[in-house]
Amino acid sequence: VNYPGNVKKNYQKEITYGNRGMTLESMINEANDYYLKEDIAVIYKKPTPIGIAKVDYSNMKITDAYFKEPSTLDYNGLYKGCYIEFDAKETNSKTAFPLQNIHKHQLDHMHRVLNHQGICFLIISINNEYYVLPGLKLLEFISTTTRKSIPYEYIKQNGYEIKYNYLRGLDYIPLLKRMDDRL
Amino acid sequence: VNYPGNVKKNYQKEITYGNRGMTLESMINEANDYYLKEDIAVIYKKPTPIGIAKVDYSNMKITDAYFKEPSTLDYNGLYKGCYIEFDAKETNSKTAFPLQNIHKHQLDHMHRVLNHQGICFLIISINNEYYVLPGLKLLEFISTTTRKSIPYEYIKQNGYEIKYNYLRGLDYIPLLKRMDDRL
């Protein structure tokens, strides 16, 4: 994982994996806050996985710790009794989404979630547009190609575009109906 | 939160909230590993919520951080398409489970999960026995009393005892069928 050196002040408030994901993350957080407030869905960002090496017990401060690689996706929760899990991914490329952004463990996890009838997807930010890409479409793409990135056109054709709304944030829940008959 | 000072070496591997919860946690982890391996359910412990104050970017080490109060429960995932969320709680008292072990935010969260048709419960270790206490039974108890602890008898009558199994750990999944018709 490549952490840019110039995002120090972001870490003061909350950890983000580089500044790329930040705007996307805050737009998703806005939507999740809206869902909670309006009692539409219950979806949280999981805490960043951190390994702790040293704790100062006099004041319960952690003085030595490190980032761990996530084996699941960043967000999960429930909507209409259904299990929801997704990750937010941003790319600067205008033509394709690089697959190196997704770890092998995370792909295995997506397989499992889908097998157990969970609703699993990515929210991809590309070309200043935002797409829900169903987990099934992602796994299908990977299983039928050796390409190292997903073309923008594939995302456009197989994903559902989310429009940012200043009251509701990146309101992705309505699009999930198109992915699952239960919703 | 009271962190005993003599558990330093536990922190080398993985953070635990004091050594009380440790045995219970490892027995639950065994069950979750078994469920993953046998493809029965997909349930993970969430990372401990940590606030990060300082990062050394030369080696990506976290040099200053602190424990945050959790607003959700520690474990979640899915089983047969249903959303599962629970917390593991241990008490040394033989007569009652102290409610101060559960934060207000967590109770609010349990309410929401149940309203959205999630399956929500506690796994309580008391008197060397282990019980699944349904969230609804917990919330009912709290709403009808001003007591600061749940009597052992209430847990026995309204919960389901889990027996530890050396192959499957604290195999709680079969007991959930009694809590929900969908399972």
Image (tube, coloured by chain):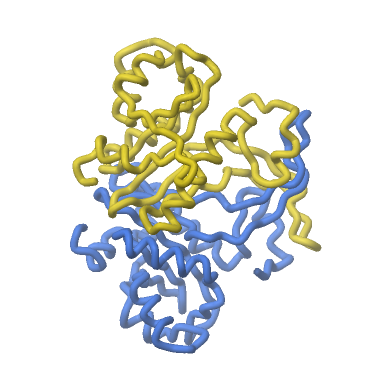
Chain colours: A blue, B yellow
| Quarter of the image with the N terminus of chain A in it | bottom right
Residue drawn at (45%, 51%) of the image: B34
At 44% across and 14% down in the image, what residue appears?
A: B149
Across the whole image, how many numbered discs are drawn on residues? 0
Residue B142 visible somewhere in the drawing: no
Residue B6 lies, with reference to residue A61, above or below; the image says above
Residue A4 visible to the viewer? yes
Quarter of the picture holding the C terminus of chain A: bottom left
Residue B160 in the image: x percent, y percent? 33, 29
* Residue B90 shown left or right of residue A157 in the figure: right
Q: Position of residue A109 (x, y in %)?
A: 45, 63
Residue placed most toward the observer, B84 or A156: B84
- Find the residue positioned furthest to the bottom: A146
The image shows residue A39 at horizontal and vertical percentages of 29, 42
Q: Could you tell me which residue is drawn at 49 percent across and 80 percent down?
A: A97
- Name the one closer to the observer, A97 or B172: B172
Quick check: B1 above or below B49?
Answer: above
x, y percent for residue A133: 37, 72
Which image quadrant for residue B40? bottom left
Question: Which residue is depicted at the point 53% across and 34% down?
Answer: B24
Taking depth in this image into account, of A57 and A28 the one nearest to the observer is A57
Give the residue at the far right of this rendering: B58
Asked if residue B156 is positioned above or below residue B49 in the image, the reply reads: above
The residue sitting at the front extreme is B166
- Front position in the image: A29 or A54: A54
Instruction: Determine whether, in the image, residue A110 is placed left or right of residue A157.
Output: right
